[in-house]
Image (cartoon, rainbow, N blue to C red):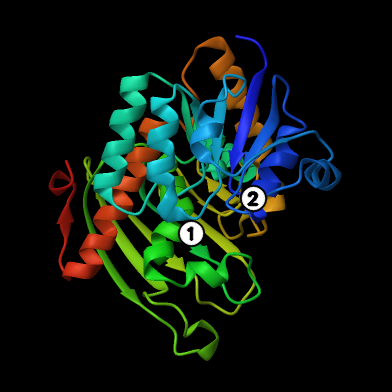
Amino acid sequence: MGELRVGVVGLGWVAGAHIETFKSVKGARVTAVCSRRPQDPAALEKKYGIPLKAYADYGKMLRDPEIDVIDICTPHPFHAKQAIAAARAGKHLVIEKPICLTWKDAQAVNVAIKKARVQACVCFEVRFSAHFLLTKSVIDEGLLGELHYGEVDYYHGIGPWYGQFSWNVKKAMGGSSLLTAGCHALDALLLCMQEQVVEVTSYSTRTKSRIFKPYEYDTTSVTLLKFRNGKLGKVASVTDCLQPYYFHTHLVGSEGSMLDNKIYSHKLKGMYKGKWSTLETHLIDSGDVKDHPYLPQFQAFTDATRAGKKMPLTDFDTALESHRVAFAADLSAAKGRPVKMSELS
């Protein structure tokens, strides 16, 4: 397959980061955009520095034979319908998280992608970050031994200062603290634990701060996960905090522990257990989309799609399972009881 021609639907903050990233991807380029608001191609070229076709009709965009990939950067509720239409049109997909806001819609997207036999990448780009490439390497090298407990937590106050605040506060748009943001932490924990979740218990609450009062749903949740082989995990999603951005990671195994980028391993001779040893890397420390590790993810998507191979790390099947756990967690919080994963078949 030759160069991939990408059409971006949605022209907000995230779309701008995607367009900028694709400029550095070898083998792909953004050639078109679609927005509900009329766009002047000359103004778009001046803004983004590349020539772009402008569509106001998504259906017309999908009928363009010169577009190979649809990159969905619209607000959450539109993702499912747009992804299904793109798959049916034979377009490969890049889908910003979350895939959708209900498990039923996620299943429908899955069916459409499988039937069309197109490639789909979901933007759980944390898996491609230096932070988690290092963490996964430590695990794979056996420095922690067999993990039996892990926690990955997302602390990011999404207030009026953040780009998506105006629409994210609505239940029908944001969904939940976990779906709108904390799913990055949940997905990262599943990457580390490498085991199937069998049951979740989740609780949710919210701050009394007036800053976050416009939210129509609880903005803090904590989820306990039971894995098939007895491992345990925990994910906190706190989108109403007033503090610096923090992506907390703590993994505990039979040979050692890892706290963010700090480690103690019984397998490394001469280490002092009284102090953590630091592994220098670029930590995940920002919620700004310009700091997200899209480049390695989009390059991997491009390389895999052109070669006719499965997308690594953030393929649709892997992302779908992370979403299934997130939907189970939200169901648990709503029902006030543990939820077995078998309830979401």
The residue located at (65%, 27%) in the rendering is: 299
- The answer to whether residue 122 shows anywhere in this view is no
Q: Nearer the viewer, residue 319 or 232?
A: 319
Q: What's the distance in space between the residues labelled 2 and 1, CA to CA?
A: 20 Å
Q: Vertically, is 244 above or below 296?
A: below
Residue 181 shows which numbered tag?
1
**Label 1, residues with CA under 10 Å away: few <14, some 14-19, many ≥20:** many
Q: Quadrant of the N terminus?
A: top right
Question: Do labels 2 and 1 touch, CB within 8 Å?
Answer: no
Residue 11 shows which numbered tag?
2
Tally the marks.
2
Q: Is residue 139 left or right of residue 334?
A: right
Badge nearest the viewer, 2 or 1:
2
Q: Earlier in the sequence, mark 2 or mark 1?
A: 2
Q: Is residue 172 left or right of residue 70?
A: left
The residue located at (27%, 59%) in the rendering is: 329
Q: Nearer the viewer, residue 341 or 1?
A: 1
Q: Nearer the viewer, residue 197 or 5?
A: 5
Q: Is residue 53 left or right of residue 302?
A: right
Amino acid of disc 1 = Ala
| SS at badge 1 | helix
